[in-house]
């Protein structure tokens, strides 16, 4: 596997680049897989590069999807499937090219004033269109201001608004001032109501936008490709309020595509926007996304008949497809990426049904030896092999932050620094048994009953997740003993799985994931970190409800508190990248050393049949770049593995 290094754009480097260039060079989600796609390679050895489909006919790309969007409103969603709409229909200030290099987007130049902590962006001419493609208005700096005001309005319930807190001056103060009506929150903190004019976003004129930061933010430029900083047409936001983004005709578009049709549980149709400033680099005329709850099963069969242009080839089909002369050359892979990482979370605030013994679980999970037993018992290579049977070891992680995600100015990989240096495989049978024996003795004294029931849900619509859970169940129970632990694998709801299961605390132990929002290790603290209020920790977006251990004074509390404190210390370092990264390694090491979470794997490059060259589209290990179809051609054939490898190695 060929791997490239993507160097994070530091604040100092960004300032130097912006002073010399019209645009900056260099190098978030939030929770499902992504696919992306560069120049076409040879389809077979000795043959010339394949041609796109007949250019005399409109290029129409078709695929199935099985999970419907709850909203089209990119300003409030935190769901990756829903972010795809904003990614393809709304342009951002900056973009990334197929090599992961920063380039101009709606902004043609930008600069930073260190004294005032203010970024200034100059905007190009661009247009808003409606769902028919008709021109509506010019895109102006005020559209970015109005979009941020919308996100900072509590009644609209943005799921990503926290990304602005501590970054944009007075963003948190404005939001909480509204949320608590200029009064005290539940912790007694008083939030005075302030005017939005005090928030650090301003339209200087129609083509000049400024962001004033709350503090130095080393990763700020990279965060601009995330939905939090997307624009929206202000008059429409004011008119529609909560109705914005509830239908295709309830929003406007300025990106590569506009959403010409949205029929829930039927189809989504994206149509090329001819008024887009970069329309010459949009090569697919229409994206037809067709809803079918059996997409994972029907997709491969429709590929055989040439009825769809892309489908995942699951592990249960892969061997047969590769062995069959009719299908072996239809199989390739998704692009390798470090934008998503997976990890097994322990739930410290169980809210599941009594039949699964939540109080018994709570005692067990607060015992470090119990967590360490599982930490060392999970053979992640076997689990990953369900989806990637050939090279599963390429995807296994020993840290939460993926390798090759962030680098210092001298090219040092963050995961090789400080307290993370030298981390190896976590699977160790002898260590797992040692910790199990210690935990068994300690937990018996606390009245814990055995086997400890461990509720492990999965989303039935996610390809291979059920099989992976079964592998983990069988492997861990065989190692630790079914008299010690009883892993209960159970299908959750296919719709709103995250809301109904993870966010509701209805699990004990579960595979979770996170997609980076910007190019800095801080982004990988978001699923675990919680800020402190007067009465305890706020929960934030915490996946595992770690703060409960501190608030309730349970055994895991001191380790969790140490982690939170070290994150706070690392975040405070803003100008020295090496020192900042080393401080974040100290925080991450606490999570790992105390087995508060178990790192698992990178997002696995799925085997697939596709008529796209997956190295042709935008790429970044954060934000929504890899959700975009801009820059990709629809080919006249499904890409073979040989062609995939030739494209990859260019």
Image (spheres, rainbow, N blue to C red):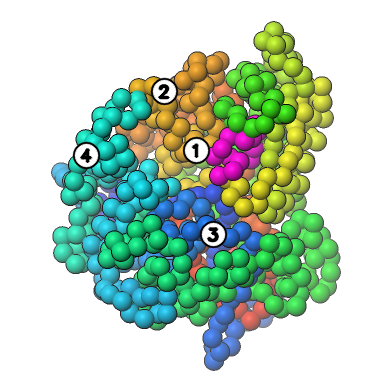
Q: Nearer the viewer, residue 600 or 441?
A: 441
> Is label 3 in contact with label 4 (beta carbons under 8 Å)?
no
Front tag of 2 and 4: 4
Which quarter of the figure has residue 3? bottom right
Percent x, y of residue 561: 45, 21
Pick whichever, 176 or 304, lies toward us: 176
Q: Secondary structure at mark 4?
A: loop
Task: Specify which label sits upstream in the sequence, 2 or 1.
Answer: 1
Checking the image for residue 380, the label placed there is none
Q: Nearer the viewer, residue 232 or 570?
A: 232
* Within-10-Å neighbours for mark 2: few <14, some 14–19, many 20+: some
| Residue 353, picture quadrant | top right
Q: Residues within 10 Å of mark 4 (few under 14, many from 20)?
A: some
Earlier in the chain: of badge 2 and badge 3, it is 3
Residue 602 place in picture, x, y as percent: 60, 47
User: What is the crowding at mark 1: few (fewer than 14 residues within 10 Å), some, or many (at least 20)?
Assistant: many
Classed neighbour count for the residue bearing mark 3: other residues with Cα under 10 Å, few (<14), some (14–19), many (≥20): many
Identify residue for label 3.
69
Give whichever of discs 3 and 4 has the lower sequence position: 3
- Quadrant into which the N terminus falls: bottom right
The residues tagged by marks 3 and 1 sit, at their Cα atoms, a distance apart of 22 Å
SS label for mark 2: strand
Above or below, 162 relative to 98: above
Please tell me the numbered disc located at residue 527: 1
Task: For mark 3, give the secondary structure.
Answer: loop
Q: Cα distance, mark 2 to mark 4? A: 24 Å
| Residue stretch rendered in magenta on the structure | 499-512
Which label was assigned to residue 536?
2
Disc 4 target residue: 193
Q: Where residue 196 appears, x then y in whole percent?
A: 21, 48
Label 1, secondary structure: give it.
Answer: loop
């Amino acid at each position: 596997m060929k791997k490239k290094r993507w160097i994070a754009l530091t604040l100092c480097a960004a300032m130097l680049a912006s002073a010399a260039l019209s645009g900056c060079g260099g190098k978030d989600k939030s929770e499902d897989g992504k696919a992306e796609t560069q120049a076409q390679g040879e389809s077979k050895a000795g043959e010339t590069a394949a041609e796109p489909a007949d250019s005399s006919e409109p290029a129409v790309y078709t695929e199935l999807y099985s999970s419907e969007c709850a909203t089209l409103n990119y300003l409030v969603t935190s769901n990756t499937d829903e972010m795809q709409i904003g990614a393809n229909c709304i342009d951002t200030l900056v973009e990334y090219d197929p090599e992961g290099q920063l380039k101009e987007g709606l902004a043609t130049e930008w600069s930073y004033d260190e004294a005032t902590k203010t970024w200034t962006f100059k905007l190009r001419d661009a247009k808003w269109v409606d769902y028919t493609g008709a021109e509506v208005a010019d895109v102006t700096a005020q559209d970015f201001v109005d979009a941020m005001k919308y996100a900072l309005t509590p009644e609209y319930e943005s799921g990503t608004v926290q990304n602005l807190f501590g970054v944009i001056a007075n963003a948190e103060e404005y939001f909480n001032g509204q949320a608590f009506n200029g009064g005290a929150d539940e912790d007694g903190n008083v939030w005075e109501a302030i005017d939005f004019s005090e928030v650090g976003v301003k339209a200087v004129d129609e083509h000049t936008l400024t962001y004033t930061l709350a503090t130095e933010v080393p990763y700020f430029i990279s965060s601009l490709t995330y939905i939090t900083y997307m624009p929206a047409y202000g008059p429409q936001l004011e008119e529609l309020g909560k109705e914005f983004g509830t239908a295709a005709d309830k929003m406007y578009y300025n990106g590569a595509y506009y959403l010409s049709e949205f029929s829930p549980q039927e189809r989504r149709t994206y149509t090329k926007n001819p008024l887009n400033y970069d329309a010459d680099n949009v090569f697919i005329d229409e994206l037809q996304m067709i809803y079918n709850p059996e997409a994972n099963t029907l997709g491969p069969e429709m590929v055989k008949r040439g009825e769809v242009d892309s489908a995942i080839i699951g592990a249960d089909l892969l061997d047969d497809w590769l062995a069959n002369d009719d299908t072996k050359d239809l199989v390739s892979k998704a692009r390798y990426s470090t934008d998503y990482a997976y990890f097994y979370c322990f739930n410290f605030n169980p809210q599941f049904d009594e039949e699964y013994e939540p109080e018994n679980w709570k005692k067990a999970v607060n015992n470090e030896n119990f967590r360490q037993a599982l930490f060392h018992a999970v053979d992640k290579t076997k689990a990953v092999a369900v989806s990637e049977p050939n090279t599963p070891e390429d995807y296994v992680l020993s840290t939460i932050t993926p390798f090759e995600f962030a680098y210092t100015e001298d090219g040092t990989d963050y995961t090789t620094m400080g307290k993370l240096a030298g981390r190896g495989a976590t699977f160790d049978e002898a260590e797992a048994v040692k910790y199990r024996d210690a935990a068994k003795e300690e937990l018996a004294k606390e009245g814990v009953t055995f086997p400890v029931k461990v509720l492990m849900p999965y989303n039935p619509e996610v390809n291979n997740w059920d099989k992976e859970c079964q592998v983990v169940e069988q492997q861990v129970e065989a190692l630790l003993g079914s008299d010690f632990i009883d892993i209960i694998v159970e299908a959750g709801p296919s719709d709103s799985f995250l809301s109904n299961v993870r966010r509701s605390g209805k699990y004990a132990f579960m595979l979770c994931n996170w997609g980076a929002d910007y190019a800095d290790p801080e982004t990988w603290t978001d699923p675990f970190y919680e800020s402190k209020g007067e009465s305890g920790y706020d929960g934030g977006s915490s996946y595992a409800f770690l703060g409960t251990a501190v608030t309730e004074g349970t055994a895991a509390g001191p380790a969790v508190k140490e982690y939170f404190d070290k994150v706070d210390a690392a975040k405070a370092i803003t100008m020295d990248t090496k020192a900042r990264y080393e401080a974040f390694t100290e925080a991450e090491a606490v999570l790992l050393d105390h087995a508060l979470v178990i790192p698992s794997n990178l997002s696995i490059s799925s085997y697939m049949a596709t008529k796209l060259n997956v190295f042709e589209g935008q790429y970044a290990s954060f934000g929504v770049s890899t959700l975009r179809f801009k820059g990709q051609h629809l080919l006249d054939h499904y890409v073979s593995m040989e062609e995939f490898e030739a494209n990859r190695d260019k």
